[in-house]
Amino acid sequence: MQTETDGIRAVLPAKWRSLDGIVGVHWDAEGHAGASGYYLSPDPRIMFFFNDVSGHIQVADRRGEVEHGERGLARAIYVPAGVPMWTRFTRRHRFSHLDLHLHHDRLMRYVAPVIGTSAARTALKKPMELHDPGPLTSLANLVVDELSTHVRHPAFAENLIGSIVTGLLDLQGDDANCKASGGRLTQAQLNRLSAFFANCGGRRLSVAEMADVVGLSESWFGTVFRQTTGKTPLQWQLSRRIDLASKLLTETTLSIAAISAQLGFTDQAHMTKVFRGVTGDTPAAWRRKPHSD
């Protein structure tokens, strides 16, 4: 992390602890009037202040704006990776704050299961500020205790931090939009899913893969997919695979065994059974029948 400060000093030794993909640091510090700081981290970062700082410290996203008092520093801040931050003290002020440096992959493990991978990536790029963190303050205090005591298993601190993450970030992603629209997939989402399935050559996709393509959590995806299509995700895939098999039987000279393997069926007998159940014909009989263009 790149840090440049002028007129800011620690007044107590820092407490810190390294966790799974997270480094937590608690600082008590003081800055005099006119003190300034510049911060740029290659990893996402959460800053949590335990006393009000908005009337004493100004913050800006661009150099120069902070000189004009762009906005007061919020109590809880999420700063995405690679986003710079400038601060300036308008008067002397002592403050206590928790710094959480999080690896991108660790954040994704907190957020993606909740809203889906696509929406999670979007959420991690959006800065967040809370002037009134509410119950997150209690969680942050518990994290500070864990930085110095090391009594409990690290998983306890990691789960506390996960709750802070989900409480601070904007997780109103595609799941929320889908719920607001009556719990149905949009045509754009269906088109993305159809294109992805086609580009994968008709292989069987997991429900998690399908949910990721349309930016939904896996649990919510299964519900809205059936409401939209009238089929489960696997039934929809099976129908698409049989459609592809029909096209390959008609338009290519590939053997039935080769088509079965390409589309992910266990073997030719498996495809024959499924194909006949859907179309009423065996693949061989389908291939012999005349088909209009």
Image (tube, grey):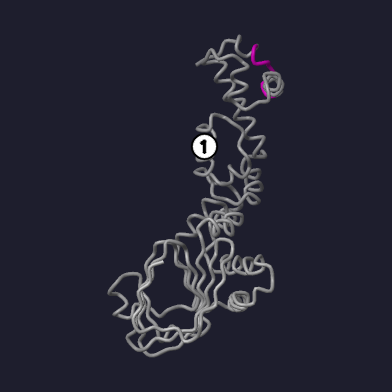
Name the one closer to the observer, 249 or 293: 249
Query: Residue drawn 60% across and 28% down?
Result: 241
In the displayed structure, would residue 9 be above or below residue 212?
below
Task: Identify the image quadrant of residue 41.
Answer: bottom left
Q: Is residue 123 above or below residue 222?
A: below
Quarter that holds the N terminus: bottom left
| 163 relative position to 103: left or right | right
Percent position (x, y) of residue 170?
52, 64
Residue 64 pos. (x, y %)? 27, 74
Q: Is residue 283 magenta?
A: yes
The magenta stretch is 278-284
Measured as percent of width and height from the top left, residue 31 is found at 39, 86
Who is closer to the viewer here, 112 or 97?
97
The three-letter amino acid code for the residue at tag 1 is: Phe
Q: From this viewpoint, is residue 248 visible?
A: yes
Residue at the (57%, 71%) spot, across then down: 17
x and y, in percent, of residue 4 in the image: 35, 74
Is 240 magenta? The answer is no
* Left or right for 271, reference 87: right
Q: Residue furthest bottom?
A: 92
Q: Please give the name of the residue rendered at 64% of the width and 51% of the height, measured from the top-left corner.
A: 220
Q: Which quadrant holds residue 37?
A: bottom left
Give 97 or 6, whichever is nearer the viewer.
6
Q: Secondary structure at mark 1?
A: helix
- Give above or below for 43 relative to 92: above
Q: Is residue 132 left or right of residue 276?
A: left
Quadrant of res 32: bottom left
What is the residue that sits farthest to the left in this orientation?
Answer: 64
Which residue, given by chain and number where applicable, does mark 1 sit on? Answer: 196
Q: Is residue 86 visible?
A: no
